[in-house]
Image (cartoon, rainbow, N blue to C red):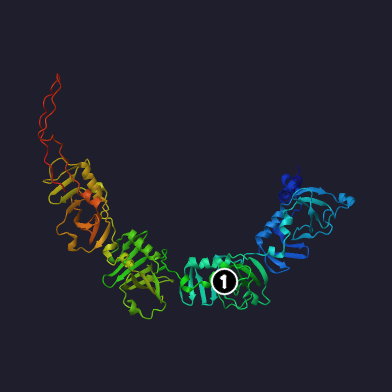
Amino acid sequence: MKLKTTLILLTLTAIVFGYIYFYDRKQPNTQEAKRQAQNVVNFSSDKIDGLIIQNGDDKIELRRRDKKWRLEGPIKDQADTPLIDNLLMDIENWQKDTTISAKEIEADNRMNEFGLNKPKLRLKLLGEGAPPEILIGKDAALEGKMYVRFENSKETYVAGQSVRKAIDKKPDDFRDKKLTDLSTAQVSRLVLKSAAGEMELEKKGDHWDVVRPLRARGDDQKINDLIAQITTAQIQQFVADDRGDLHPYGLAEPRGSITLFGENDKSAGRTDSSPGAQGQMLQIGAVPDKQKDQVYARFASRGFVYTLPKKVEEVLNARPNDLRDRHLARIDRSILDRITIDSPAKGKTALARKGENWTIASRNNVPANSAEVGRLIDTISEEQVAKFVEDVASDLPKYGLDKPQLQLIFSSFASENTAETKAGDHPFATIAFGKVEGDNVYARVNDEPFILALRRTLLDNIYVDPLQWQDLAMFALKPEQIHRLDISTDKSMSLLRLGNNQWTWAKDGGSGAINQTNVQSFVNTLSNLHAVRWVGAITPAHGFDKPTLTLTFTTSPDDKAAHKLIVGAPGGNGMWFARVDERDGTFLINNPDMNALKLSLVQAPAASPAPGTSAPAPSPGAVMSPTPPVVTSPVAAPTP
């Protein structure tokens, strides 16, 4: 075969395959073709950009813009987009039951009988691939069916009535009953005016602030709930356009208004003509005489008077203090690196984050009680203001805030200088505590001008003694690491670990059989000993001058790595005061741990018969066993 012939065949093959790929694959398969043949009309709904419904004297025109539908006639307003989209879906899936040919109709002159000569209801779809105008006729003999034809054909179909039910409506039925297309999350600013004055709220990041008549943190949940009353409001009645006399509706001088601004429209001073440039204003008017559960309202962005549920007017009752954040402070954990507790009486305690844990930076970064630090952060984050005392902090000495008794400073930390920030602490929340009065303590946050009243007991949760922030774990050991025990109560004893994980008495350390089980329990408790909490500096009341228990132990065969635990007096509530040589201060241990450290380490002697009792007489004919020799029990060592 010649090369030229081969190339021609390859070219023809490519053309055939191209036809199959680009054209034939777009053709409906047998099942789809069968379904389309049964449809009243075939079109692509996403290419339809308009509908015209002629319903008697009403000509309803709908147009799609930016994926949303608008009513263009006989009135201009937002249309119910989901309603129109569902209508198009119904038309796409609209199937015919029977077809009556044009010849049959002409022969019998039945067009009037079907109501299709001059029908009251007509539907025109606009857009690429739109069918001719659809004429809707009378009910057919079959239940739930009706007659339908296209304007350019007398051929008639018997089809379901769902489309007729969807379009046989008044213009108002196609209007969007949702007041605004703004969602609650899209609102970034609002201005509320009422008889009580004007209030402005603004969203910064994820949080709301009260901007006027005072500057304060806003309560995100309450403000979002207030906005949702507007964004989710459903129109009850379409009353009139707003170009006429508004006095009958109480809207010539409305009782109040709330203006919503979207994410890209935060400035009330903007003068451009883009949609929403001046916000979306809702004005609240009077209550209708006959619908006491509704209220007249004018929504400027839609240019009409409506009635809304009366509950909407509750937004006018909102006051700045109602919408203020009653949380003491916003603690951003994602940037929190340092906590400084500044007490004039005790000095400064600095806590620093180290990965997922915390250290006491002011004490050479010794491990801190990370759970306690977390509890402090939670406590401050969740604390609610008992009362807003003053909105202007003009008299700090009156509340003891000119010289606070305590300051709590939350900071981020930069280890090096960068273009964005300098090295060192960068406080983002500072809380100053002043005088205590009754059950409250006065406080002030950051540079906010407000004087707050908080629970006095909050101070009890902020430890000013750095010793109280120490880690609760006393010895980071495994039980098998402990080599020697020296125990002193009213008596003393010493034990050594043998190579087979058993224990024996050290020289002159004790006598008698050792209770290996109790020793192991003792060692387990000691190696994993945790404080219940730290008390603070050592005082005579802790009873260390006359200890209940003194315990020294080593963790190496040469006995050089020694540790010491001293248990002093009872600390109340089933706890005991204790201290260790490695740490400063006193801590509390619980009663179960103390009981384990007081276990008898000497095996108890076997029980002997009570004095004066005799063995039972042998039965007649029984063989007497020889009397066993008497074994002297070892002398028990003193119980620690």
Q: Residue at x 21, y 44 (%)?
A: 518
Viewer-nearest residue: 470 or 589: 589
* 221 on left or right of 610: right
Q: Is residue 423 visible?
A: no
- In the rendered view, does 269 fall on the left or right side of 466? right
Q: Quadrant of residue 499?
A: top left
Q: Position of residue 337 (x, y in %)?
A: 37, 65
- Location of residue 220 in the rendering, given as x and y in whole percent from the top left corner: 48, 67
How many tags in the picture?
1
Q: Where residue 67 sits: x, y (%)?
A: 66, 62
Residue 392 rendering spot, x and y as whole percentages: 41, 79
Reply above or below: 257 against 369.
below
- Amino acid bearing label 1: Leu
Quarter of the picture holding the N terminus: top right
Residue density around tag 1, few if under 14, some if 14–19, many if 20 or more, within 10 Å: many
**Residue closest to the eye, 58 or 331:** 58
Residue extending farthest to the bottom is 394
Q: Vertically, is 200 above or below 130?
A: below
Secondary structure, mark 1, is strand
